[in-house]
Image (cartoon, grey):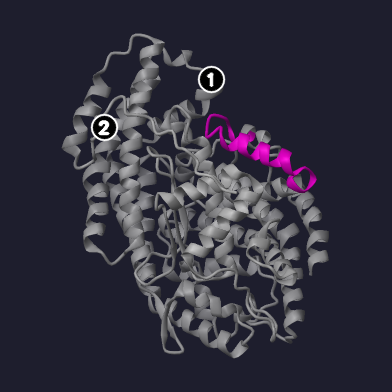
Amino acid sequence: MSAFVPLVIKERQYLPADFKVTDWEALLPWYEELKNRSIDSLVSLEKWLQDISELEAVISEDACWRQIHMTCDTTNKEIEEAFTYFCMEIEPKIKPYSFELNKKLLACEFTSQLDKNIYFPYLRSVDNSAKLYREENVALQADLNLLAQQFGVISGAMSVEVDGKEYTLQQAAKFLHSPDRNLREIVFNKIAARRLTDKDKLNELFDKLLALRQQVAVNAGFENYRDYKFRELGRFDYTVEDCFAFHQAVKEHILPLQAMMVKHRQKRLGLDVMRPWDGDAEPVGTEPLNPFKGGKELSDKAIEVFSRLNPYFSGCLQTMVDMNRMDLESRKGKAPGGYNCPLAETGAPFIFMNAAGTMGDVITMMHEGGHAVHSFLSHSLKLSAFKEYPMEIAELASMSMELFSMEHWEVFFSDDKELGRARLEELERAIGVLPWIAIIDKYQHWLYTHPGHSVTERELSWQEILNEFSTGITDWSGFEEFRLNQWQKQLHLFEVPFYYIEYGIAQLGALAMWRQYRLNKQQALDNYSNALSLGYTKTLGELYSTAGIKFDFSPAYVKELSDYVTPILESMM
């Protein structure tokens, strides 16, 4: 049974209760006051930090709503203009003040008296931000934010027609699960052709992004954007070399598992040759899984699943429904993808999805629901900055929830055979995504350490990396051009560069959490909640340790997890 989770929304102590972000002139006095305020004790320092936190939370929530509204309707020019105004006229003016406030904190004589058990990751991040700041990058980063949003505009306009009806590419993907191979081939061809229609437009956009990102790196004293971005992302707990080790571990220990899964599907389908439209298909006579119809049924069933894990978890989702903080169904003009957007002041986040009734949508809902629970669990932390946790722990929250919730998917499937298929599909996805993560991450290392490369060089590098992590089982003949440009579907490359290996690190962590859950359900769920409630007041290693697992993605650890999962997968096939 779910329950409404009461949010403790603190009354504003610094800004007026009715203050709204309108323009820079309205914000300027508050930043000036914080910049010039005298700090004469540890108590006054902590009050100053809390006032900064309140201001940041109000601004962050306003900015998030602008982005949410734009992704929900990419065709509304007024909404786009509001987002653009924030990016161009407000955010660039905030950054110099944030830099000054960071310098003031680092220079303050009482900063050393702050409790290191809580403040260490935050102060480390502040120091990092201050060292990276360059005034000349402020305008460039505003331009980058705007340019990156064009990916959603271009992709959101993509649709195909199937049997006389128009579908977004997300909606059309459900036909690739159909047992009708002819239909799958027709739809795959249409999707591929539609993506290639905008190939040049996306290449042009990406070239602009690459050039601006390289300039930002050079301005900050870095040879390339890869090294700059590692610092900007605050990757204090692992290195570039660790990423390369991850790539190698996936190739050695995960790719054979993926090959086993592809061969299993090929055998079930009774095919001599696997083609690109066969990867998600079911045999003739087996209907695609149909876990829900419409957004309301999806949220209702998700709430029920979460209630069987922990009533607090389901209460989080119920609270979001009651506050109208979900937009789940796919439609034309809506940006692609899915996300959970934390809302710093009110605490209840927003889930955005493009659900079309597929099993993949269930997984996405569980995933974003995990992020939502993380937002709720960490909301009571004293500073907004404590809730700005790195993606390696954020994605652990979401990916672990997928695997935990899998144990209760009878809510979506009354038929045991369908339930078994759904669970197998989730495990296949959890394993199968790791080679793709390695591909995208390795590609990004190449992209940003080869500034000034041509489109042709980019395609050849992509092809080489893609082949390195391919099982070689699927025949792509006739789709060589589409395959060369397959990277263009990955929004992270356009919108959030280098944010992708976090998924791989967290997926390995989630498999370890699931192993823990299968051994002791309650202990695993307690560890999970305890770790997430810490926000970013501990290092990644400490957060993973609190969750009862290791922060490790070495070949030896990847092999250990692979060896655990292999017999389970084999028993389900």
110 left or right, relative to 505: left
Q: Residue 263, located in which quarter of the rendered image?
A: bottom right
Residue on which disc 2 sits: 17
Task: Give coordinates of residue 103: x percent, y percent.
Answer: 35, 24
Residue on which disc 1 sits: 116
Tag 2: Cα neighbours inside 10 Å, few (<14), some, or many (≥20)? Answer: few
Q: From the viewer's side, name the closer residue of 320 and 330.
A: 320
Q: Residue at x 22, y 25 (%)?
A: 32
**In the image, which is nearer the foreground, mark 1 or mark 2?**
2
Task: Give coordinates of residue 462: x percent, y percent.
Answer: 54, 67
Asked if 39 appears above or below 559 in the picture, the reply is: above
Q: Residue 136, located in which quarter of the rendered image?
A: top left
Asked if 406 appears above or below 89 in the picture, the reply is: below
Element under disc 1: helix
147 left or right, relative to 481: left
Q: Amino acid at mark 2?
A: Ala
Q: Residue at x 40, y 21 (%)?
A: 106
Residue 479, magenta (yes or no): no
Q: Residue at x 34, y 53 (%)?
A: 67
For marks 1 and 2, the one nearer the N-term is 2
Task: Give coordinates of residue 210: x percent, y percent.
Answer: 39, 57
Q: Residue at x 77, y 42 (%)?
A: 520
Tag 1: Cα neighbours inside 10 Å, few (<14), some, or many (≥20)? Answer: some
313 left or right, relative to 515: left
Visible residue check, residue 440? no
Residue 535, magenta (yes or no): yes
Asked if 61 appears above or below 8 in the picture, the reply is: below
Q: Which residues are magenta?
A: 517-541
Q: Amino acid at mark 1?
A: Lys
Circles 1 and 2, Cβ within 8 Å, touching? The answer is no
